[in-house]
Image: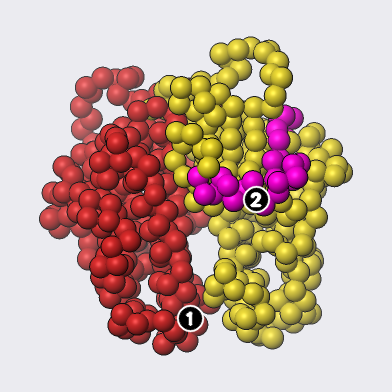
Chain colours: A yellow, B red
Amino acid sequence: MSTSESHPEERSPKKQRTEPTYTLIYWPSIPGRGEYVRLALEAAGASYIDLCNTSSGGVSILQSFLRGDDIGSNPPIFAPPALQVAGEGLNGEPLLIHQTANILRYLGGRLELDGENEQEALWTAQLAMTALDANNESHNTHHPIAVAKYYEEQKEEAKKVAFEFRTVRVPKFFSYFERVLKWNEAKGQGKYLVGKKLTYADTTLWQVMDGLHYAFPMEMAYRKQSGAFPLLFEKFYPGIENESGIKEYLASERRLPYSEGIWRHYLELDRRDKDDSKES
Amino acid sequence: MSTSESHPEERSPKKQRTEPTYTLIYWPSIPGRGEYVRLALEAAGASYIDLCNTSSGGVSILQSFLRGDDIGSNPPIFAPPALQVAGEGLNGEPLLIHQTANILRYLGGRLELDGENEQEALWTAQLAMTALDANNESHNTHHPIAVAKYYEEQKEEAKKVAFEFRTVRVPKFFSYFERVLKWNEAKGQGKYLVGKKLTYADTTLWQVMDGLHYAFPMEMAYRKQSGAFPLLFEKFYPGIENESGIKEYLASERRLPYSEGIWRHYLELDRRDKDDSKES
């Protein structure tokens, strides 16, 4: 069906909506996976409502969506984040979609955050998915046994998983993204993963790196100092946070602080010193 | 860029290619994540090469792709599966993409396996991604600490994770997909998740259920007998495996047996009896 997609801008150029088109539905008070959606919207300067953070309903609004209240002809949501888009569902009702990578690809096409042609859009999608895999593995470091149980109930296993994540998986992901930045260096100058300008793959990887800085500050300092990932740490990471839209957003109150979500800082899960060669 | 996508059929109607358009690059000898791609191709009757299973090179071919040999102007691959598509890359060279959900969405649009409009395509994508999340969690049951280590090195943790997966996560995923089948029952008759005909969300969820039958036969028998998921077990699962294309594929030698991949059968990780109320 890909031929039937069209930009809303093409259908109604310069039309001013009185309400925001996009509504983000996600847990209140934490960045979480909602942050990947926020960053794409903010980078494009799109108007949106962060529903559970800006209404008094908070969690109960989210829960009503998860129960399936008021979702119209859309299928049920499995888990947040979800995105509601005014007028884009069947018969002109609100569209409701979920899965972070699905939302990002949808927004990427509409907000011109997925490159200049079909190939770049496909590469943007796969790179964002790979960064989201790193996000999931990072969450798994503090909840390796059961997402429904407390960290304290799985602390010993968490130490093992965090050690593996920091010493094997992080270098694997970083080596890969360093290779991609190198591959695109002629066009992206080490600042963009795909093509000549910002895509949602960039904002997604940036958020993963930023979350890792919060969760594992010692490990990230070590990886930066190692010199093994010069494009990633010296050009990409500082470059993205100074992008138009992103810079203003990060300085605003809309950017939520890290706390007890995906990104958590537990001293015992981080690197202890330079010679972190065995499990603590 | 979504407006620039077009079906190859539209560009060259009824053109017969002398070589298959699609080449799947995945580990040889196991179904794995490659199976989601195979099922989509087989369901559509598309011609393809399963490269590492049909050439003498096997693993070494895959490794050369992962190193970045002969990938042309495409970015590096993080992990298999990858899909190569003749003539669809930049300047008419082969296109190379990775990430299972990305490959499926690409094929879904070209092979008419993602519904009848943009909304159904988005729902198909999110449902396939949710089924793939269940795939990943199932893999995690036998490798909860480190993918690079042997099962025997993480057997005790695996028992805990498998118990949580079977008793909490499987019912959560199944309840969700049962709700989706119910939501679409008027159109899909309990057999399809989205709309009136087969999508890659169906083939993906079917493969997850089939893999779970292999890995956790006791648990799956218990869930079926519970009667809590009638559409899923009585209509959907037997329906999809009798779909045209799928039925012939499953009876062919191209369908690889389960062994030591994502889906593994360890007696100690499965349910033991009806009263499996605590960790073994």
* Viewer-side residue, A267 vs A32: A32
Give the vertical position of B69 relative to A114 (above or below). below
**Residue B22 can be seen in this image:** no
Label ID, residue B275: none
Q: Residue at x 39, y 46 (%)?
A: B180
Q: Horizontal placement of B214 versus A120: left or right?
A: left
Q: Residue at x 69, y 86 (%)?
A: A280
Residue B68 position in % (x across, y down): 49, 52
Depth check, mark 2 against mark 1: the one in front is 2
Q: Is residue A141 magenta?
A: no
Q: Which residue is mark 2?
A: A60
Residue A217 position in % (x across, y down): 79, 67
Q: Quadrant of residue B225?
A: bottom left
Q: Which residue is mark 1?
A: B160
* Viewer-side residue, A78 vs A130: A78
Q: Horizontal placement of B237 versus B116: left or right?
A: left
Q: Name the element at disc 2.
A: helix
Image quadrant occupied by the N terminus of chain B = top right
First to last magenta residue range: A43-68
Residue A90 position in % (x across, y down): 45, 26
**Residue B10 can be seen in this image:** yes
Image quadrant occupied by the C terminus of chain B = bottom left
Residue type indicated by callout 2 = Ser
Bin the neighbour count of mark 1 within 10 Å (Cα to Cα): few under 14, some 14-19, many 20 and up: some
Q: Residue at x 53, y 42 (%)?
A: A69
Task: Say which chain tag 1 marks.
Answer: B
Q: Residue at x 28, y 52 (%)?
A: B231
| Marks 2 and 1, how far apart at CA | 32 Å
* Viewer-side residue, A247 vs A92: A92
* Viewer-side residue, A220 vs A255: A255
